[in-house]
Image (cartoon, rainbow, N blue to C red):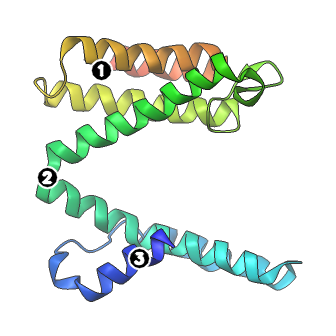
Amino acid sequence: IYLLLMFGMFLFNSKDFSYRNMVIGPFIPYLIWIFIPLLRSPDAFTAFQKTISTVLFYAITPVWIMKALAEEKEHFLKGAVLTMTALLFYGLFMAVIWPESAYLMGRFRGVTGNPNSLGIICTVFFAMFTIINAHYKEMFARWEVAFIYAVILLSVVLSGSRNTIFAILIFYSFARF
């Protein structure tokens, strides 16, 4: 429903969106391909809803992100960082109060449902936060920076994702250059 509302707002206010989605081009073959499994789906209606949701996500999200970056870049970036931190922190909080929901076969999965998904999210978030913090040094206080890195790194260590640990180490090492 949210994607439909975003799409409707885009259609009815298209003059407010100076940015056009240039990201979607490489995904067009994928977006065509995802309609093919609908022919064999046991629940075609639900599958169609999910397919339309995916198409709308790829079509609308970049436009809205570029609009937010153009109009209120610092506010948007800070909100994105705080949202990701809250999601990771909530996963850590769940590990304390309801461990069976936060762990999968002994590995921490947070709110993602899968330890490897958590690792991917932490890798991208670590890089994103490092870059944002380097460009906007005054956006976060020192204790906030320390807290955000602590939440990310604790999530990574608990997930046990070796790929994530090495990806973060490689990124951090090359970020110095």
- Which quadrant holds the C terminus? top left
The spot of residue 100 in percent (x, y) is: 78, 25
Q: Is residue 64 above or below residue 176?
A: below
Label placed on residue 5: 3
Give the Cα separation between the discs numbered 3 and 1: 39 Å
In which quadrant of the rendered view does residue 35 lie?
bottom right
Q: Residue at x 84, y 78 (%)?
A: 43
Pick whichever of labels 2 and 3 is earlier in the sequence: 3
Mark 2 Cα-neighbour bin, 10 Å: few <14, some 14–19, many ≥20: few
Residue 176 visible: no
Residue identifier under label 2: 72
Asked whether the beta carbons under mark 3 and mark 1 sit within 8 Å of each other, the answer is no
- The amino acid type of the residue labelled 2 equals Glu
- The amino acid type of the residue labelled 1 equals Ala
Residue identifier under label 1: 175
Query: Horizontally, is 96 left or right of 99 in the view?
Result: left
